[in-house]
Amino acid sequence: MITLRNIEKFYGSLPVVKGVSLEIRKGEVVCLVGPSGSGKSTLLRCINNLEALSGGEILLEGERVYYDWSPHGLKRHSASRIAQIRARLGMVFQDFNLFPHMTALQNVMEGPVQVLGVKKDEARARALALLQRVGLAERSDHYPDELSGGQKQRVAIARALAMKPEAMLFDEPTSALDPELVHEVLSVMRELRDDGMTMIIATHEMNFAREVADRIIFLDGGLIVEDSPPSVFFEANASVRKDSFLRNLSRR
Ligand SMILES: Nc1ncnc2c1ncn2[C@@H]1O[C@H](COP(=O)(O)OP(=O)(O)O)[C@@H](O)[C@H]1O
Ligand SMILES: [Mg+2]
């Protein structure tokens, strides 16, 4: 469903993603792990076009997105076409990125009304249903300031789902949370998995990755060094780099 072909990303002359190829099937859950600075966020941001690619291409359902080849080289799609494509991928960030001046309900309604042109009554009803689904029906009139981190992140997930995405991208969704709030976000993600949502999840939650992932991808220095099911990933004979990465995590 999502195809990455030789994705490269440079910041100035600094290569951060160095040629990543990946095929993600519909309904698959892929966890992206690796040391800080290995390029996880950059790769997710490239998939959602929050960053322009330096090289390679991205296909959704076999169709090249964001760019097309022209006789003069790569040409960016129009802004409106890119906005439509981006709406097919929901994104959840480490630091929630909610609109602070809007209630939970308004946050969830905003995209459908502004981007998809859904009527307000319909958007409100769907937003309430989504807030209920993430366990926040009674918090719908609260502002982000009045919510815990776990609640904010669940609003952010509801907001992404409101766009009816075909896949969800998560960038360390629990890293900014107090430890006791992590489980409420992970359990919402677990339910999404059970509903068959395609997901790419950058995370340091190894137990969660082991439980929900179909594949775990270990990124190091902007390259995929391993792509395997959890049963293989957590085998004893790990590479030296992976071994030290996993050890460092368990020491935190
Ligand atoms: N906007 C940027 N400008 C310059 N360098 C960046 C930018 N964003 C990320 N980087 C660099 O790219 C590398 C990968 O970062 P990132 O994708 O955030 O890794 P991860 O999410 O795995 O921690 C890091 O060395 C980081 O400093
Ligand atoms: Mg990151």
Image (cartoon, rainbow, N blue to C red):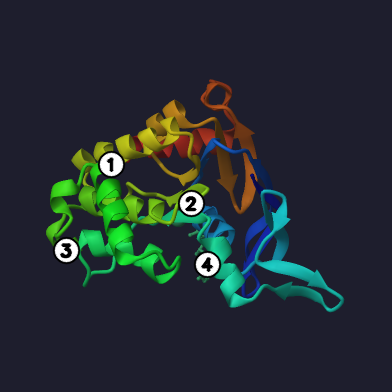
Which residue does the numbered mark 1 point to in the structure image?
133
Q: Amino acid at mark 3?
A: Tyr
Give the x, y percent position of residue 46: 58, 61
Q: Residue furthest bottom?
A: 72
Of labels 3 and 2, earlier in sequence is: 3
Circle nearer the N terminus (1, 3): 1
Instruction: Assess disc 2: are there few (<14), some (14-19) or many (≥20) residues with their C-alpha within 10 Å of its C-alpha.
Output: some
- The residue shown at (31%, 62%) is 109
Circle 3 or circle 4, nearest the eye = 3
Badge 3 density bin: few <14, some 14–19, many ≥20, Cα 10 Å = some
Quarter holding ligand 2: bottom left
Residue 198 on image: x %, y %: 52, 41
Q: Secondary structure at mark 3?
A: loop
| Mark earlier in primary sequence (4, 2) | 4
The answer to whether residue 176 of the structure is visible from this angle is no
Q: Amino acid at mark 4?
A: Leu
- Asked whether, in this view, residue 9 is left or right of residue 204, the answer is right
- Total number of numbered labels? 4
Residue at figure coordinates x 19%, y 62% from the top left:
144
Using the image as rendered, state which of residue 150 and residue 54 is in the foreground.
150
- Residue 118 in view here: yes
| Measured Cα–Cα span from mark 2 to mark 1 | 16 Å
Q: Is the Cβ of the residue at disc 2 closer than 8 Å to that at disc 1?
A: no
Give neighbour class at mark 1: few <14, some 14-19, many 20+ (Cα, 10 Å). Answer: some
**Tag on residue 50?**
4
The vertical placement of 239 against 45, above or below, is above
**Mark 3 and mark 2: Cα distance apart in space:** 24 Å
**Amino acid tagged 1:** Arg
Comparing marks 3 and 2, which lies closer to the viewer? 2
Local packing at callout 4 (Cα closer than 10 Å; few below 14, some 14-19, many 20+) is few
Which residue position is annotated with label 3?
143
